[in-house]
Image (spheres, rainbow, N blue to C red):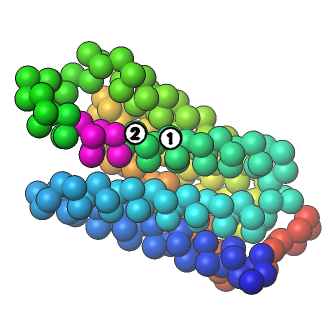
């Protein structure tokens, strides 16, 4: 399999990420089994992560050092956040069943858990702002998704304070990745400097 084919497959995964993310939101809002929503959420993050990799690989020469540094931070942020989502979604309910008196409504009482959530937010902020900036400044595919990624990173920090900002952040990154993955599939080749 050639690098171009790998990038195209990853781009399809990135496109699917938005639809899985929407399904996760619908399942969560409808009140169906919450565990299924968590599985969908984790799957969506993984698919979006592959999409981000496709976008980077499609134009890595154009994105330069900033692009490389930012994709590494963003991938770390994805993995960290997936781990945090799994901790909160799967482990805390089990711990609560074992110890019903534990109050997980206030996670600040549980230092490592709140620190993991805080670290996840910071990594997402830094990773998305830098990745978005590299896309906005250096992309030959399209620049505006880079601005959307930067906005998603900043809104992620405020999402815990104002719910609608969290939702906008939550859906903005998959939209930007979908937008760029469609461009990756349309162009069909790995770009080098000077290609449009």
CA neighbours of label 2 inside 10 A, class few (<14), some (14 to 19), many (20+):
some
Residue projecting furthest to the left: 100
Q: CA distance from mark 1 to mark 2?
A: 6 Å
| Mark 2 residue element | helix
Given contact means CB atoms under 8 Å apart, are the residues at marks 1 and 2 in contact? yes
Question: Could you tell whether 55 is left or right of 195 in the image?
Answer: left
Tell me if residue 89 comes above or below residue 5 in the rendering.
Answer: above
Expressed as whole percent of the image width and height from the top left, the position of residue 170 reads 39, 50
Expressed as whole percent of the image width and height from the top left, the position of residue 189 reads 79, 80
Q: Is residue 182 visible?
A: no
Residue at x 30%, y 29% (from the top left corner): 161
**Image quarter (top left, top right, bottom left or bottom right) of the N terminus:** bottom right
Expressed as whole percent of the image width and height from the top left, the position of residue 169 reads 42, 46
Residue 80 is tagged as 1
Is 96 or 174 nearer to us in this picture? 96
**Image quarter (top left, top right, bottom left or bottom right) of the C terminus:** bottom right
Q: Residue under circle 2?
A: 84
Query: Residue 174: within the magenta?
Result: no
Residue at x 13%, y 33% (from the top left corner): 98
Splitting the image into 4 quarters, where does residue 59 fall? bottom right
Q: Is residue 157 visible?
A: yes
Expressed as whole percent of the image width and height from the top left, the position of residue 135 reads 70, 54
Which secondary structure type mostly characterizes the magenta part of the structure?
A: helix
Range of residues picked out in magenta: 86-92
Splitting the image into 4 quarters, where does residue 43 fall? bottom left
| Mark 1 residue element | helix
Tell me if residue 25 comes above or below residue 15 in the rendering.
Answer: above
Is 155 or 83 nearer to us in this picture? 83
Question: Could you tell whether 10 is left or right of 163 in the image?
Answer: right
Tell me if residue 71 comes above or below residue 53 in the rendering.
Answer: above
């Amino acid at each position: 399999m050639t690098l171009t084919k790998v990038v195209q497959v990853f781009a399809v995964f990135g496109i699917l990420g938005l639809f899985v993310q929407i399904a996760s939101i619908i399942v969560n809002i409808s009140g169906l089994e919450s565990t299924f929503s968590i599985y969908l959420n984790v799957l969506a993050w993984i698919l979006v992560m592959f999409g981000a990799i496709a976008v980077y690989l499609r134009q890595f020469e154009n994105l330069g050092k900033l692009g490389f540094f930012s994709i590494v931070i963003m991938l770390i942020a994805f993995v960290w956040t997936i781990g945090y989502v799994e901790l909160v979604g799967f482990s805390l309910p089990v711990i609560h069943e074992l110890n019903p008196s534990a109050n997980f409504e206030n996670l600040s009482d549980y230092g490592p858990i709140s620190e993991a959530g805080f670290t996840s937010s910071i990594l997402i902020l830094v990773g998305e702002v830098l990745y978005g900036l590299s896309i906005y400044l250096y992309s030959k595919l399209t620049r505006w998704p880079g601005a959307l990624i930067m906005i998603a990173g900043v809104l992620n920090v405020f999402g815990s304070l104002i719910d609608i900002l969290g939702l906008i952040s939550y859906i903005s990154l998959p939209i930007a990745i979908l937008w760029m993955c469609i461009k990756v599939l349309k162009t069909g080749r790995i770009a080098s400097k000077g290609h449009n």
